[in-house]
Amino acid sequence: MLQAAGISFTAKASAVDERALEAPLLAEGMGPRDLAVALAEAKALDVAARHPGALVIGGDQTLELDGERFTKPGSAAAARAQLARLAGRGHQLHSAVAVAHDGRIAWRHVASAAMTMRPLDSAAIDAYLALVGDKVMGSVGAYQLEGPGVRLFEKIDGDFFVILGLPLLPLLAYLRDAGAIAW
């Protein structure tokens, strides 16, 4: 998304173990929306610690269904089960972004989108999974809206970039305000 927006950047992987970081937060009762922010901040701080002086962007997305947080499915069977639970129901995607600079969080933002999946029978789920293959393992909820996953939905309320996993417009506004981009 940043590349498509004409933003020059260098991608660096975070070494944050998301499951280990979130375990105590979930035990304390943190909800999916706040968890997305905590993970985005942790990733940004982790990379920023290795790159002093750099403006580091970290992001995370969580999916919430009736207060329950979904994670990326680890198998086709898990993807099938997630899609079956989401079918015919509404859920929320929470996308968080944090910017770290010199060991501190300089800015953060979280936005949500409401997604309503159309009713799906097992044949439709199987056909979708056969079409997209292993790509579902890399996406919370087992779908990608920018591809055939859009066919699973009957209603979407929210910013397209939030659904893709990054609140891009608020991030661009911050980068302009911070002087990191000109326009």
Image (cartoon, rainbow, N blue to C red):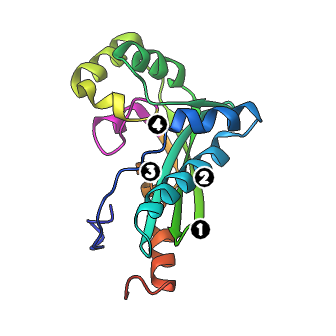
Instruction: Give the number of the mark in front: 4 or 3.
Output: 3
Q: CA distance from mark 1 to mark 3?
A: 23 Å
Q: CA distance from mark 4 to mark 1?
A: 41 Å
Instruction: Point out the stretch of residues depicted in magenta.
Output: 141-154
Give me the residue at 44% from left, 30% from top.
Answer: 72
Q: Which residue is mark 2?
A: 37
- Does label 3 or label 2 sit earlier along the sequence? 2
Residue 164 rendering spot, x and y as whole percentages: 40, 50
Q: CA distance from mark 3 to mark 2?
A: 12 Å
Q: Which residue is mark 3?
A: 165
Camera-side residue: 99 or 53?
Answer: 53
Q: Secondary structure at mark 1?
A: strand
Q: Which residue is mark 1?
A: 104
Tell me the amino acid under the disc marked 2.
Val
Tell whether 181 sits left or right of 128: right
Instruction: Give the number of the mark in front: 4 or 1.
Output: 1
- Does label 4 or label 3 sit earlier along the sequence? 4
Q: Where is 67 relative to 111, above or below? A: above
Tell me the amino acid under the disc marked 4.
Glu
- Does label 1 or label 2 sit earlier along the sequence? 2
Q: CA distance from mark 4 to mark 3?
A: 20 Å
- Does label 1 or label 3 sit earlier along the sequence? 1
Quick check: marks 3 and 2 in contact, CB under 8 Å?
A: no
Q: Crowdedness of circle 1 by 10 Å Cα count: few (<14), some, many (20+)? A: few
Q: Which residue is mark 4?
A: 154
Q: Secondary structure at mark 2?
A: helix
